[in-house]
Amino acid sequence: MTLQKKIIKLLGVKEVIIPEIEIKNCIDFLKKYLLDHIYLKSLIVGISGGQDSTLTAKLCQITAEKLRNERKDINYQFIALRLPYGIQSDETDCQDAINFIRPDQVFNINIKKAVLSSENSLKKSGIIISDYIRGNEKARERMKVQYSVAAVKKGLVVGTGHAAESITGFFTKYGDSGTDINPIAKLNKRQIQLLLKKLNCPKHLYLKKPMADLEDEHPQQDDESILGVTYNVIDSYLEGKKIDLENQKIIEKLYFNTLHKRNLPVIP
């Protein structure tokens, strides 16, 4: 078996999907988990205005509505968290996403003071962090807030990670990867777009250029320029298609360099 086939098998990506079926599968997955853990009553997602959180949140909102109707239990809720760092440059997209998702509850919690407080505490001990490290601090602060809300709201922190991020390690360890459940984990980027389109998401949202936007010195820098390869090529690799050797080397190098992000902590 080739490395490409091993990775595809490990990540569970399908070569072809039927959006309606994948939407149902994701919702059934979320429903079953909540019903198997009856003390959990809410689903929680941080909304960034990008494709991944928009799809995940919409699936969660549909799930909560179905459970309320089927179980006659009004306690099932979807909670959307807006977690900007100061003023977010694409706030309009965030609000458009919120309007599309129509969450049961929305909380706006600005993480900037918390991140800067942590940075200043480190500085007093002689630890000076870079802009890149501060970006990871932002991701970890966001996840910390989600778990605080989850603890109060009997909630489940739902991840927005997908296969194209997983293969490249394009996520923050114990940041956006620190979640309870990941309904879209086996999808690649273009499959995410297909599901959003099927759910009647506004076109400018599902075609939006992906960007983590974590670094102050490189605002609005798109993912592909950082990765050195396009999501279209990554998706083709994940669907078992033949791609050019140079891009294949980039993807597989990213995969091996980030193995530690996908593995549990090392023990004796």
Image: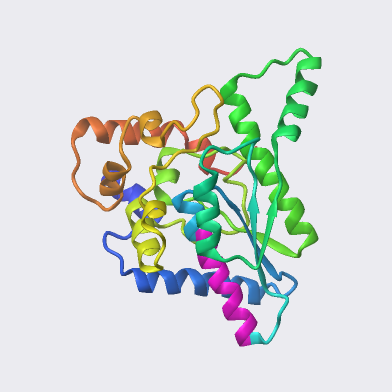
Coloring basis for residues? rainbow
Residue at image point 51% right, 67% down:
59
Residue 257 coordinates in the image, percent (x, y): 44, 31
Residue at image point 47% right, 52% down:
52
Quadrant the C terminus occupies: top right
Residue 91 coordinates in the image, percent (x, y): 55, 45
| Side of 106 relative to 255 (left or right) | right
The one of 207 and 255 positioned closer to us in this rendering: 207
Toward which corner of the image does residue 152 lie, by quadrant? bottom right
Is residue 267 in view from this perspective?
A: no
Residue 172 coordinates in the image, percent (x, y): 56, 37
Is residue 89 in view from this perspective?
A: yes
Up-down relation of residue 166 to residue 248 (above or below): below
Toward which corner of the image does residue 39 lie, by quadrant? bottom right
Up-down relation of residue 10 to residue 260 (above or below): below
Outermost residue toward the front? 92
Residue at image point 56% right, 54% down:
159
Count every numbered label the image shows and give the total.
Answer: 0
State the extent of the magenta-drawn residues as a range: 56-70
* Prevailing SS of the magenta stretch: helix
In the rendered structure, does residue 65 fall within the stretch colored magenta?
A: yes
| Side of 75 relative to 202 (left or right) | right
Up-down relation of residue 18 to residue 245 (above or below): below
Residue at image point 36% right, 30% down:
225
Residue 88 coordinates in the image, percent (x, y): 58, 39
The one of 25 and 145 positioned closer to us in this rendering: 145
The one of 229 and 52 positioned closer to us in this rendering: 52
